[in-house]
Amino acid sequence: MNQNFKQAADIKCSVKMESETISKNGVSRFLKSIILIIAVLSLQNCSNSNEKHIGEWKGKNSEGEIISLILDKTNNATFVYGNEVMGGDNFAIDGIKLILKYEVDCSKSPIWLDLVIYEQEKNEEIGRFKGIVRFITDTKIEYRVNFDDDNRYENFDSEAEGTIIFEKIHEDNKRANGWLDALKNRKFSFGNRKSSMEKDIKGLDIEYRTGFTTDPLWRYRGVYLSPAVIMKLTNTSDKPISGEIIIKCVFIDNKKQEELSIEVEHFDTPLQPGLSRQFSIESMFRVYISEFSSTDISCQIYINGQLWKAVKIENERLD
């Protein structure tokens, strides 16, 4: 039996029993008890509603453009719109690392669902996109968010700007996160793709491999692949490598002579002598699996603002 239904049935039974024995002097106490019970159930329903938001959502805005939204249990959010990504591990603007969080207030009517940007180092809020949300079903929501100013919409309009109809993706999002971790920790054969940063960062050797990976946001649909660079940094010196290392990858469509995306990775130091670290940088640009073998994509790799190498993205799968 549904837990909420059972609680409601128990309350109904309790009310019936008490109404049969209640006296005139006990009316006030009885009403207070009912109000308290209703308040408790309201809070529980609010909590349940909040939990329903957690997961991966895919939908379209009023213009028919595809958008994805991931909300996890730690209040982290990822918002994907075309080839633009807000949130995730590589979320940064002008080299400043950022975090995208979400806040839900289901005591409001309609429910508030805000996307909030924080500067990671200072844990300071620097931007907020205010939104409202309603459940059409348990797996379908209407979300209206304002990206233009600080105002909050007061009602829903499926044809209006800022409205997105999302449907929940049932696959467990932890599997996608686990796949990303596995990719970053996977041991690749780099062949002779090796270079040294002796001039800029003493003792740092870099190996790399390129290809296409399954986009984690669409992994279970088996539709898209993303160009990627897998890198392995090794400290060949006898001292730790410290200081900031920022790696920027500019993915380029050589046929169209067009930038596809720019991704930035902040490499955490120190890197101790003799140790290596492997990671991947995936483009937010996606291609159909049936088309990736005919693409002509390159990547310009910048390290601390200097062009290190321009490489071809091999037409092969890395996963």
Image (cartoon, rainbow, N blue to C red):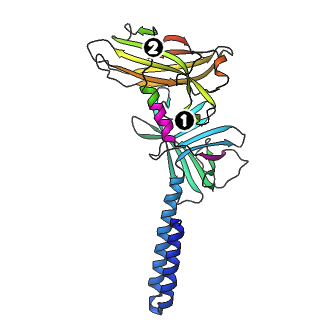
Around disc 1, counting alpha carbons within 10 Å, would you say few (fewer than 14), some (14 to 19), or many (20 or more)? some
| Disc ID at residue 190 | 2
Q: Is residue 294 left or right of residue 96?
A: right
Which image quarter: residue 273? top left
Q: In the picture shown, does residue 124 fall above or below 37?
A: above
Residue 105 makes an appearance in the image: no
Q: Residue furthest left?
A: 238
| Disc ID at residue 36 | none
Residue at 64 percent across and 13 percent down: it is: 254
Q: Nearer the viewer, mark 2 or mark 1?
A: 2
Q: In the picture shown, does residue 317 fall above or below 238?
A: below
The number of numbered badges drawn on the structure is: 2
- Relative to the observer, which residue lies in front, 146 or 22? 22
Which x, y percent locates residue 170? Answer: 57, 46
Q: What range is drawn magenta here?
A: 158-181
Label 1 SS: strand
Residue at 38 percent across and 7 percent down: it is: 199
Which x, y percent locates residue 190? Answer: 45, 13
**Which one is earlier in the sequence, the residue at label 2 or at label 1?**
1
Q: Is residue 66 left or right of residue 219?
A: right
Which x, y percent locates residue 253? Answer: 64, 17
Q: In the picture shown, does residue 272 fall above or below 20?
A: above
| Disc ID at residue 86 | 1
